[in-house]
Amino acid sequence: MNAAVIPISPMHTIEPVLTITGLSISLPAGADRALAVEAAALSVLPGQTLCVVGESGSGKSMIANAVMGLLPRPQVAPVAGRILFEGQDLLQLTEPQMRELRGRRIGMVFQEPMTALNPVMRIGEQIGEVFDAHGSVPAAEKRRRILAALADVGLPDPELLIDSYPFRLSGGQRQRVMIACALVLEPVLLIADEPTTALDVTTQAQILKLIRELQQRRGTAVLFITHDFGVVSEIADQVVVMQTGRVVESGPAARVLGAPQHPYTRKLIAAIPDGRAQTVPYDEVNRVLQVQDLCKTYHTSGGLFKRGRAVQAAKDISFELHRGETLGLVGESGSGKSSVGRCLVGLAPFDSGRILFKGRNLAQGERFRRAAAGKIQMVFQDPYASLNPRHRVGAAIAGGPIAQGVGKAEAMARAMELLQLVGLGADAAQRYPHEFSGGQRQRIGIARALAMQPELLVADEPVSALDVSVQAQVLELFAQVRAKFQLAMVFITHDLRVAGQMCDRIAVMQRGEVVEYGATQQVLNDPQHAYTRKLIDAVPRLAGQVDTEAKVA
Amino acid sequence: MMKNPFWRRFRRNKGAVAGMVVLLIVAAVALLGPWFATNDPWAMVERPFVQPWAEPGLPMGTDTLGRDILSGLVYGARVSLLIGMVSTLVALLIGVTLGAVAGYFGGWIDAALMRFTELFQAVPSFALAIVLVAIFEPSIKSIVAAIAIVSWPPVARLVRSEFLTLRQRDFVQAALLAGQSTPRIILTQILPNAMSPIIVMASLMVATAILLESSLSFLGLGDPNQMSWGYMVGAARTVLRQAWWMALFPGLAIVLTVLALNLFGEGLNDGLNTRLDGRSK
């Protein structure tokens, strides 16, 4: 509604580095709306960070690409408005003029660090390309400046790194290289498009800190695109909130986060999991699952002349789960939490240890699944891969019970009921998965799991692929389902906030080992292990949330 | 409901539409032709070496033995299409089964089946087909069998690679958890998702099979009781400089049909590729 409002800054005497006014970007015919971005306005001041925040499809990345001149023209092209960068309208510039600006005056960092670097080029060469693209620098001078840039972004051993290939670096390190690349010519504006979304939470915290430090030291203006309000509150000076292509709210970070005006902003902020547990009393006697000393090692097969590598995904994992109880398995990528989940449902064999389901020892593989008789079910992470694109939704849900010998009519009737329960109409049964959104597909996945009348539900990152408002709804559904069916649940997540909200107990995993295990309140408020403390500290949080958590403690 | 987006994408490929029209004409000729071309393709109806249009009722002339070339073409269409389709079906049956089993079970089953497949791929396929037809009596059945035996390995490879990736999908895991049986998972969960590349490949295989059959007949290894395009080209070979029309018409028929099949296959590829128009709605 107030799309034309330009954020008023206390330092309004300073000229903004970037001013966007009335920017509209068209979408190709047949898209869900005519304009990807409609009359967007914002301005970025030197030395400040402007966060553009919104859910997927809100058009926030389009703005970044429009500034860089990277829109896939002519299907997607700016149709109105101006992008003023240091007094020049970027939309009027020719491609050679834009190329001159890119890299030199405007740097950009992308979301996916694993694919942003060319795997067959040494790190030094990749950064060196930026110099080569903008005039020639003597080789010795170039090397000196690359080394300085690598040291600047906090990479260890720049002398060693400059001659190594990207595969030696972790995701966080690659993102540092990308930042070094973007900043090496000291641009006045840095555009960061979800630069931490693909990273673990502790790595994310480090990268955010790095961007903030570099910015303060050099006075770079930063346009930061993100979907995460936690990240916003960590880094933003100014915030622009976008919904379906429109700017719905903009202003200083403290005001937008502290006293949001627009209902959409309020909804987004309310949807952030606050980590406050909603404990439901559970059955202390009825043990559904006992896991004893579970070990699992992955062997990458070696060739004729090289030895295979072994990765320990689970090492002496033990826990038990009662009826109606939820255990959170928390850890960063590679901690083995998903491997444990797959062992629990019998989709992956384990090396040693025992898994007892309702007191019965479950063997391995096919026998495991037959013994469990479908009473152990799983909800998968990727809602787009978890449903067969060729099966109607009703058939997909009823398929399980039919395989267990339930009559076809009865199974279909139950599928209808479940679709109602998860908040989709019964008419959804006749449709194909591609007609549903990610959140709706995840609901279908939950309905499919519930159709087997499971006693144990393993949910592997069920909300991490969803937008924050959808995430809140799906978490709500999980809580409701758990209470209704008295399910025992293993909830695998990398997000401590989600775990805090969903789980009765939390097991923190690091490199295949459980380093901390206890009641949610205790783990979150009084972490014993250093790794847990590091994880909790790394979670970006809204300023207001610290108070509520302190109160709970 | 499924058809509309498919046809929209298929129609966008003009070559594919042309190919389909040619194929429909060839199929119509094969089905209805014998009613119009009343001459027996083996019967001597005129003196030999009659030029096209020289005699009424013989628009394509006669061959070295005075046989009606138009009749030969019409009956040859039946043989070519029949052999092309049946041998492709048989090859699909072998290839899909072996590929599915290898891709689904993996491990040593996969290794064994793939080495078996490579055994066939290591032999030049045309040479193998000649040997097979020569061992058995040349007949429609033996030709179909020979063509099927030399053309299934690529199918097995394709299906295996599709199964290897699809098997890892979450919906297959969910079906495993629900306790669905292995054949059911292979047939209802994975195979439908692997159908599009198989169909595209099949359309191209029909073309290769027609070429193979023509080549065999050209070498005199065709069914002696069936007129076929390859046989006609082969018979005309010795008089190519005196009577161009004897080789030209059957040759054109082969080229057009194979080209049409290739264009059609490409169109199928476009039509079945939902990614081509962004999202399939």
Image (tube, helix red, strand yellow):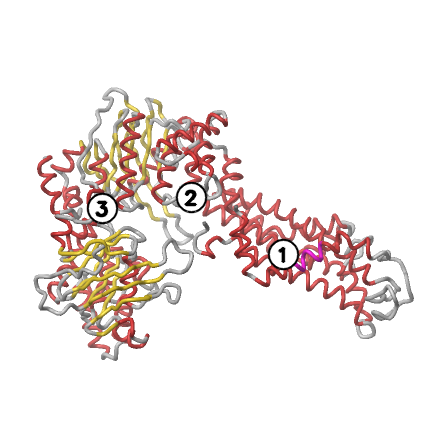
Nearer-the-camera pick, B256 or A434: A434
Q: Mark 2 points at which residue?
A: B169
Disc 1 secondary structure class: loop
Asked if the stretch drawn in magenta spans residue B122, the answer is no
In the drawing, what numbered circle is on residue B123?
A: 1
Nearer-the-camera pick, B1 or B177: B1
Rendered image quadrant of residue A382:
top left
Image quadrant where one finds the C terminus of chain A: top left
Q: Name the residue under label 3.
A: A268
Disc 1 marks a residue whose amino acid type is Val
Disc 2 secondary structure class: loop
Left or right, A519 with reference to A34: left
Disc 3 marks a residue whose amino acid type is Leu
Mark 1 surroundings within 10 Å by alpha-carbon count, few (fewer than 14), some (14 through 19), many (20 or more): few
- The magenta segment is B20-27
In which chain is the residue bearing label 3?
A
Mark 2 surroundings within 10 Å by alpha-carbon count, few (fewer than 14), some (14 through 19), many (20 or more): some
Dot 2 or dot 1, earlier in sequence: 1
Marks 3 and 1 sit apart, C-alpha to C-alpha, by 64 Å
Disc 3 secondary structure class: helix
